[in-house]
Amino acid sequence: DSGVTQTPKHLITATGQRVTLRCSPRSGDLSVYWYQQSLDQGLQFLIQYYNGEERAKGNILERFSAQQFPDLHSELNLSSLELGDSALYFCASSVEGWGKETQYFGPGTRLLVL
Amino acid sequence: DAKTTQPPSMDCAEGRAANLPCNHSTISGNEYVYWYRQIHSQGPQYIIHGLKNNETNEMASLIITEDRKSSTLILPHATLRDTAVYYCIVRGYSGGGADGLTFGKGTHLIIQP
C-alpha cells in the first residue's frame, strides 16, 4: 500500500459524457501527478500539481483538466469522452515535486467509455 | 531524461536470482536510475533508485556500471509474486521544476514455478 488513494476504482460511462477522478496523496506529500495507461500508448504523464498550482504538463488533451485543492487532494476532469479515452488513470504523489524525488502511485481508476 | 533500452521479456525460475538489464548510454551526470514494477494492472510500485553507487534495499539490489551506461536490477530470490513488468527510468534532477516519469515498454519478467 503506497498511501495514495484513488476513487472510484472503476467507472463506466458513455461517449460525450464528463467524469471526475479523485486522488488523495500520501500524508505530507505536496505534489500530485496524473498518468494515463492505455493499451496502445503505454503509461503517459498527463499533468503535475504542487501545493495547488500547476507545475508541469505532459500529453494532456484540452478536453481534460485537473486541479489540486487546499487539502491537497486532486481531481482529474475528463469531458466530451471518446472511446479512446478508455484507460487506466493513475495518480502519484511526492513530497515536493522535484525531479529526483520518488513518486508513489495509487491503485488507479479504470475508465471504460462505451 | 535519457532514453533506456530493456529486453521485452525474461524468464526466471522461482527461488533463483532474477537479473534485469537496462542500457542508458546517454545518461548524464546528474541523472538517477529508477526502477518501478507493475503487477498486472496495479499502480506502478517503486523498487529502488541510484546515482552511481550500488544500492540495496529490502526488495532488490541495483548495480550501476562504472561508466553509468548500464545497470542491472537484481531480485535475489524471485517468487511467483515477482511476475510483473519492470521499468527502468532515467530521471534528471531539476532544481527549478519537475515533470512526470517517462515509462518505456519495460521488461515483462515471468517467474516460472
Image (tube, coloured by chain):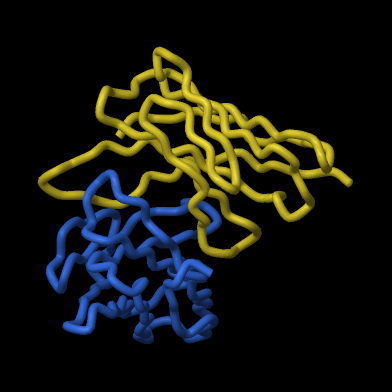
Task: Indicate the position of residue B32 as horizontal and vertical percent values.
Answer: 35, 34
Q: How many marks?
A: 0
Q: Is residue B101 left or right of residue B79?
A: left
The picture quadrant where one finds residue B108 is: top right
Q: Is residue A40 above or below residue A15?
A: above
Q: Nearer the viewer, residue B17 or A88?
A: B17
Task: Indicate the position of residue A26 as horizontal and vertical percent values.
Answer: 36, 71
Q: Residue at x 61, y 38 (%)?
A: B107
Q: Which chain is blue?
A: A
Q: Residue at x 14, y 43 (%)?
A: B95
Task: Indicate the position of residue B47 as horizontal and vertical percent values.
Answer: 52, 48
Q: Nearer the viewer, residue B34 or A62?
A: B34
Q: Is residue A28 above or below residue A97?
A: below
Q: Residue at x 48, y 43 (%)?
A: B48
Q: Residue at x 35, y 84 (%)?
A: A20
Task: Indicate the position of residue B89 as horizontal and vertical percent values.
Answer: 42, 39
Q: Nearer the viewer, residue B55 or B33?
A: B55
Q: Which chain is yellow?
A: B
Q: Is residue B42 above or below residue B68?
A: below
Q: Is residue B102 left or right of residue B64?
A: left
The picture quadrant where one finds residue B2 is: top left
Query: In which quadrant is the N terminus of chain B drawn?
Result: top left
Q: Is residue A77 left or right of residue A9?
A: left
Outermost top residue: B67
